[in-house]
Amino acid sequence: MAEVVHSAATGPDLLDFAGEALYFDEPSLPVVTELVAAAQSASTPALARARLEEALRLAPDDLTVIVALYRFFYFQHDYAAALPVAERAMQAAGRRLNIPGDWRVLEVADIERSGRSRMAMTRFLLWAVKGEAYLLMRLGRFDEALARLEKLATLDGADRLGTAALLQIARETLSEIAETRSH
């Protein structure tokens, strides 16, 4: 495995994950794999959702299922339904990394520690936080998104995850909202 490059100023290189297994490389129960495949070929969104929710019931910590359900809601533009799924992804990743799955209490030291041995999963956790922030922006909840994006900016000083652009949009939108309300 490649050594993770980092400095005190930027933290670990969040793009360095050579040779690591990714979340979808984790084994799933055969019935869960079948349900996810059946959801992909379902004739209606309701049937796809039912199959994914059954897979999640059987394997509540399976990241392949969690990501499939998140994507389902995202592509259905049901951002409110995707929010708790993003939260579930963070919690599951945090458990695998033995660090907090709650973005509010994550520290740079957590990211550095987990990144030394499992950079791909560490990055997955941070992408889930970013995904949740994006969903909140789509829902018009820019203040909540901003809090998550500011935390990501502290955890990823080199902006390897591309948070800066979303952070700027959230700040500008909140500024515009405040200006509109003051008139």
Image (spheres, rainbow, N blue to C red):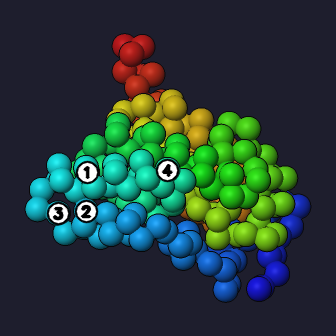
Report the amino acid beneath label 4.
Answer: Pro
Residue 130 percent location from the top left of the image: 53, 51
Q: Residue at x 34, y 49 (%)?
A: 53
What's the CA distance linking mark 1 and mark 2? 7 Å
Residue 9 percent location from the top left of the image: 84, 60
Residue at the disc numbered 1: 49
Q: Residues within 10 Å of mark 4 (few under 14, many from 20)?
A: some
Q: Residues within 10 Å of mark 1 (few under 14, many from 20)?
A: some
Choose top left, top right, bottom left or bottom right for residue 42.
Answer: bottom left
Report the amino acid beneath label 2.
Answer: Ala
Report the amino acid beneath label 1.
Answer: Arg
What's the CA distance linking mark 3 and mark 4? 21 Å
Residue 49 percent location from the top left of the image: 25, 51
What's the CA distance linking mark 2 and mark 4? 16 Å
Q: Residues within 10 Å of mark 2 (few under 14, many from 20)?
A: many
Residue at the disc numbered 4: 60
Label drawn at residue 42:
3
Quick one: which residue is furthest to the left in this view? 43
Residue at the disc numbered 2: 39
* N-terminal label among 2 and 4: 2
